Image: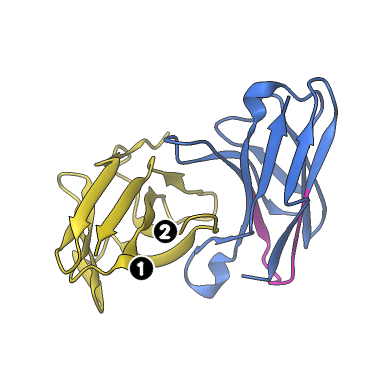
Chain colours: A yellow, B blue
Amino acid sequence: GENVEQHPSTLSVQEGDSAVIKCTYSDSASNYFPWYKQELGKRPQLIIDIRSNVGEKKDQRIAVTLNKTAKHFSLHITETQPEDSAVYFCAASRETSGSRLTFGEGTQLTVNP
Amino acid sequence: DADVTQTPRNRITKTGKRIMLECSQTKGHDRMYWYRQDPGLGLRLIYYSFDVKDINKGEISDGYSVSRQAQAKFSLSLESAIPNQTALYFCATSDPGTGTDTQYFGPGTRLTVL
């Protein structure tokens, strides 16, 4: 089955700095890579996703990059703000009829004012 | 997301007791999932169901069972609860027919087994 590893487990940055979270996956057939944000005491919510037919996707201050050859993908947050503080999860799956997501272990991001 | 609800939100029980966690959704999604969240271990899949007649084990199904009573309802049971089942439990739904298999999570149930 799929195995997803996520690094770092904790990340502390100053407001305005950039943050990068990296994930590696084991199943070369995986083709869907979402990122979820979980604020303290809240449910996980999708913030961005990428499919294997593209190498990068951006949404305002958030971007995700994918390297299929190396089997890793990364979340980039620019101009971080205190409200970006949360746990971020990456995930991977084969987006087929029988697939389901495998999650990384999460990264606790703290943005210091 | 109020479209996915879980009951109860918090539960304290004793070792050996049977407990049921319930999940309901009004999103009309066929796919439903139960996850367990422990500190530092992310979200681990317990069971999933792609339609009412389809039930599949996830990576940590031992000690758990599920029932898909209808498209909108998916229940998780602990037949004989043990302390290491203390965790935060999330239900989720998805509908790949929308063009993406985005999962929508319920608010979670915090379960403590004494």
Residue B48 place in picture, x, y as percent: 64, 45
**Residue tagged 2:** A36
Q: Main secondary structure of the magenta part?
A: strand
Instruction: Report the magenta residues as a range.
Output: B22-34
Mark 1 to mark 2 CA distance (whole Å): 15 Å
Three-letter amino acid code of the residue under disc 2: Tyr
In this rendered view, identify the residue nearer to me: A97 or A65: A65
**Residue tagged 1:** A83
> Label 1: how many residues lie within 10 Å, few (<14), some (14-19) or many (20+)?
few
Instruction: Please indicate, yes or no, whether residue B109 appears anywhere in the rendered image.
Output: yes
Farthest residue, direction front: A113
Counting residues from the N terminus, which is met first, the one under dot 1 or under dot 2? 2
Residue A105 place in picture, x, y as percent: 39, 40
- Relative to B39, residue B96 above or below: below
- Which chain does tag 1 point to? A
Q: Is residue A40 left or right of residue B82?
A: left
> Label 2: how many residues lie within 10 Å, few (<14), some (14-19) or many (20+)?
many
